[in-house]
Amino acid sequence: MPHSSDSSDSSFSRSPPPGKQDSSDDVRKVQRREKNRIAAQKSRQRQTQKADTLHLSLAKSYLPLKILLEHLLEAPFWLPALSTVNQHGSPPHVHCIAPQ
């Protein structure tokens, strides 16, 4: 006749008693949450650093573009001078600033 297992048979019970299991699960949850909190904080710091780097890069490239835009906005005033030829047959000298 096959042997029936009952709840008092300890050979099939591999999990810790309910009280200990709850306690160890709680400890694991707390540890996992703490580890996750630290990882999230590091991720936010990396994102902030990346945004700061991009902002500085943008600020550095903005100034030459601003200067170029100012010169282009002045173009209606000096552009007609380029199309005229002075008495010697050469175009007038125009100072242009190239972006760096």
Image (cartoon, grey):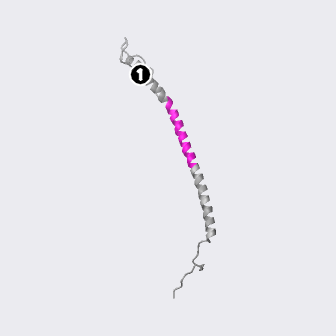
- Say which of 89 and 85 sits in front: 85
Residue 56 screen position, x and y as percent: 54, 36
Percent x, y of residue 69: 45, 26
User: What residue is shown with label 1?
Assistant: 75
Category of crowding for the residue at label 1, using alpha-carbon neighbours closer than 10 angstroms: few (below 14), some (14–19), many (at least 20) = few
What's under tag 1, amino acid-wise?
A: Ala
> Which range of residues does the magenta coloring cover?
42-63
Question: Is residue 100 shown to the viewer in this render?
Answer: no
- From the viewer's side, name the closer residue of 98 and 8: 8
Instruction: Examine the rendered structure and indicate whether residue 44 appears above or below residue 28.
Output: above
Quarter assignment of residue 16: bottom right
32 left or right, relative to 94: right
Q: Name the residue nearer the viewer: 87 or 13.
A: 13
Q: Residue at x 53, y 41 (%)?
A: 51
6 relative to 28, above or below: below
Tell me if residue 49 comes above or below residue 92 in the rendering: below
SS label for mark 1:
helix
Residue 20 picture location, percent across and down: 63, 68
Dominant secondary structure of the residues highlighted in magenta in the image: helix
Left or right of 99 in this view: 13:
right
Which residue is at a point 45% across and 20% down the rendered structure image? 95
Which residue appears at 56% of the width and 43% of the height? 48
Residue 85 point in image, percent of width and height: 36, 15
Work out which residue is located at the far top of the displayed protein and give it. 87
